[in-house]
Amino acid sequence: MNLALLLETLMDEPRFRSCVEARVSLPARPASYAPFPEWVDPRLKDALAARGITQLYSHQAEAVEMAHACRHVVVVTPTASGKTLTYNLPVLSRILENPDARALYLFPTKALSQDQVAEVHELITAVGADIKTFTYDGDTPQSARKAIRSAGHIVVTNPDMLHTGILPHHTKWVKLFENLETVVIDELHHYRGVFGSHVANVIRRLKRICAFYGSHPAFILCSATIANPGELASRLTGEDVTVVDRNGAPSGPKEFVFYNPPVVNKELGIRRGSVLEARDVATRFIKNDIRTIVFARSRVTTEVLLTYLKEAVSEFPGLPEKIRGYRGGYLPLERREIERGLRQGRLLGVVSTDALELGVDIGTLQACVMVGYPGSVASTWQQAGRAGRRQDLSCAVMVGSSAPLDQYIMSHPDYFFGRAPEHGLINPDNLYILLSHLKCAAFELPFAADETFAGGSTPETLAFLAEQGILHRSGDKYHWADQSFPAEAISLRSAANENFIIIDITDEGRRRVIGEVDRFAAPMLVHQEAIYIHGGQQYHVDLLDYKEKKAYVKEVKVDYYTDANLAVDLKVLDVFESKEGATLKQGLGEVLVTAVVTMFKKIKLHTHENIGWGRLHYPEEQVQTAATWFSVPAAVAAKFSPSEMETALAGVANVLANVAPLLLLCDPRDLHVVPQVRAPFTEEPTVYFHDHYPGGIGLAEKLYEVLPRVWKAAEELVDGCKCDAGCPSCVGPATELGPKAKGLVRRLLAEARPA
């Protein structure tokens, strides 16, 4: 059955149709073309013509002209719109014209780097020119590295390798830095939050080294649709960047379905699980030979859903093997093999975290199923765009969960389709991040006493580092004086750069590494007695060796998975701002957040019942970050009994935490909430919202400003929910908060209002 017929069949089924909150048909869009510029080398034109490309899309033509003129440009168009050609064309033309010219390509992941190298290699081979293009990352053999440093016309890498493997060793890369004319940064929208803030400082270091060698490269950036591409590109590169966002590429028709699982308990407002519903929808696609990608929000959900899908098609010989999982923690060779299987059409389905949201070439998929709202408008369109990369009909189905944010989106589809994508927020001047990269920059090249790396604070910071013995001042220069290699100690992706290795010991005679997990996630995913799922296979964690950073696992077959509980404590270290209204007090400052995994639950597959639990004892993790908070004055709190206040505060915290990302335009995972019924700092009922990242990236400050708007949206969500006592779609489940939860939350939202 083809996709169009299957969609109509589904819509004719009463149960499916009753769950569809919205179905939006996005029409096909014709292409807008422009001729190749005259300066494009004829060999390139011939090579592209052999591929069927005889003219450019209008946005490609506009972008390559700017790049040829050495202007900084960011191209912002949807997936499958030919962004790769906007940088390959000017770069290859320039190298054909001047063989000494060099280019640096940056991609956020190794997978993307290797994917793009394969594409540019094909084009270079067709041209028949001696343009040497190499991937330089952690997998590059030592024997090849010297040749790449001296001969590479195009060096393809990722920010992590640029940070630790290239910039600190720039004296070995003289040929590159003396002749560097173009820096390509693809997937700009991925450089948000702490990662983007780190990368902006890596670019500052890159430009500093280029200036030392006498080069001043132009930047070509590419991005999926976000609200502030020009601002983000400028903050990332430190340059004025021109935006090209009028898409000239064609697209096929797409059906976008908002699917809300049926209510199974009206009194409690509980819906059937989104994982089970997504399984059913994806199974229908796969059984009808429709190539499908399913996006899940977490690694555990990815593996659970993969298990369900394989079971659902088990009666069809050979079909379970055509469904694979894809997520962080899989080893590189395994991920490459899955990508090839998708490109070559050998796989019919893949269940992935947002790891496949980026533009890795995975061929042509027809359907995308999203388990829950991905957290942002931009991510939703990225995931939906992974299906329908040609001009045929495609379909995206977003299956809502009971979470308030999901339910808000499900009940307000016009809000989603009329909403501009989120802003990419970064804070390159975050003190923690900036100080780390100042050390790296000083290691790479001495600092002049009056040199500024960012803003006007560099001289004072350099003097501070000299007092610490990290730098040494000689005349008007600061030199690196420490014994350490600073870049190695700094992870661009997280607060920790230590990974735990997962070792399969099922066969004692053949131990093998099957995956890895970062330090903060290890106690949650591979704690003692955890069921770790990898590729659909279940493993029991026999031992988590925290000191050696290793988890030892054995294959098992059980009918449950595990979910760990994280206990969080928060202390205020400093207050930056505060304001006091008649019924609510607000604060903004720096906090110390302490988190420790305390217990885990055993969750039965399919029914999702809690069938057991166990205690855990692991070291606590601490982070200093920015937070905003509000506290309820004694006069208002006196209107509630202690137990009522505890329920009301927990409910208000829950609904605000789910509404805030809509107004902050951020991912819900970037902002954490901690309610305290009697906070040690304020001695009043208080709710804290803190940035997930050390030092913060500006979310707490923004929430401090817009709290009245968030408060109003929370009231609208609670009033608009059809439940009686409270449910997961508004204040939280009545089974946890009590039957009076919704009424108490309404009272607190009405009694206490921000100024």
Image (tube, rainbow, N blue to C red):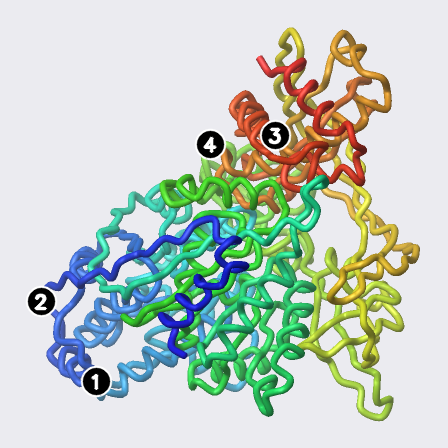
Q: What amino acid is found at the position of numbered circle 3 in the picture?
A: Val
Q: Residue at x 80, y 15 (%)?
A: 640
Q: Earlier in the sequence, mark 4 or mark 1?
A: 1
Q: Residue furthest left?
A: 38
Q: What amino acid is found at the position of numbered circle 1 in the picture?
A: Val
For the residues bearing labels 4 and 2, Cβ distance under 8 angstroms:
no
Secondary structure, mark 1, is helix
Calculate the distance from the C-alpha at mark 3 to the C-alpha at mark 4. 47 Å
Q: Residue at x 20, y 62 (%)?
A: 60
Mark 2 highlights which residue?
Answer: 35
Horizontal and vertical percent for residue 394?
37, 67
**Mark 1, residues whose alpha carbon is within 10 Å: few (<14), some, or many (≥20)?**
many
Calculate the distance from the C-alpha at mark 4 to the C-alpha at mark 1. 48 Å
Q: Is residue 676 left or right of residue 702?
A: right
Nearer to us of marks 2 and 3 is 3
Mark 4 highlights which residue?
Answer: 456
Q: Earlier in the sequence, mark 2 or mark 3?
A: 2
Q: Is residue 126 left or right of residue 649?
A: left
Calculate the distance from the C-alpha at mark 2 to the C-alpha at mark 3. 55 Å
Q: Nearer the viewer, residue 387 or 343?
A: 387
Calculate the distance from the C-alpha at mark 4 to the C-alpha at mark 2. 46 Å
Nearer to us of marks 1 and 3 is 3
Mark 3 highlights which residue?
Answer: 718
Q: What amino acid is found at the position of numbered circle 2 in the picture?
A: Pro
Horizontal and vertical percent for residue 591?
72, 32
Residue 229, numbered circle = none
Horizontal and vertical percent for residue 324?
58, 78
